[in-house]
Amino acid sequence: MKVGIMGGTFDPIHLAHLIIAEEARVRLGLDRVIFIPAGDPWMKSPHKVTAAALRVEMVRLAIAANPSFSLSTIEVERPGPTFTVDTLEQMWKELGYETQLFLLMGWDSLADMPAWKAPYRVSKMAVVVAFPRPGFSRPDTTTLESAMPGISERIVILDEPCIGISSTNIRARMVGRRSIRYLVLAEVERFIIEHQLYTE
């Protein structure tokens, strides 16, 4: 079985997340894509992050219509900071070691990967699939290779789709009382408004 792992803060989840997950599913022939909201994202600790229960519910609403998408709350349930290496190890145990994992991320995250906990172990457990992010350059595999020898053979760098939607921009638009329609699914937009998220 080939399974995509789509981790993130998802604060909030938006259409680019869904498009990238579907693109990866089709292009790589994945059986399914699992969305994993971060519990305590250590790399974003200086920033205020919406309560995990609310972020989880937004993901649930966003992926409900796609039978190939599923939700895992293992990072939310795990105490302490969230590390990708721990998540992959747990997913392998749950899915079976014969499962081939594909870790989906943006070019920006791939460039930061050498600073992660046990990045070499991450690259051994999963094929890294990197998508373009507006404003970020294509990752330098030479630099990555020096930090994680052999990773070049475990990376798939895609040049599309490149979608200019970000959670940061969506939060800013909510603060400015601007429309977020067509940036998130209608169900997610209703949830955000109902719970008065990102208004300050």
Image (tube, rainbow, N blue to C red):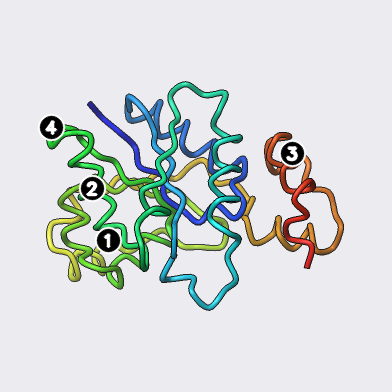
**Residue 112 in which image quadrant:** bottom left
Marks 4 & 3, CB-CB < 8 Å contact: no
What label sits on residue 90 in the rendered view?
Answer: 2
Residue type at mark 3: give it. Tyr
Of callouts 1 and 4, the N-terminal one: 4
Mark nearer the viewer, 4 or 2: 2
Marks 2 & 1, CB-CB < 8 Å contact: no
Instruction: Report x, y in % for residue 8.
Output: 46, 53
What label sits on residue 182 in the rendered view?
Answer: 3
Mark nearer the viewer, 1 or 4: 4
Instruction: Report x, y in % for residue 5.
Output: 35, 42
Mark nearer the viewer, 2 or 1: 2
What label sits on residue 141 in the rendered view?
Answer: 1
Q: Secondary structure at mark 4?
A: loop
Q: Nearer the viewer, residue 73 or 154?
A: 73
Instruction: Report x, y in % for residue 165.
Output: 64, 50
Mark nearer the viewer, 2 or 3: 2
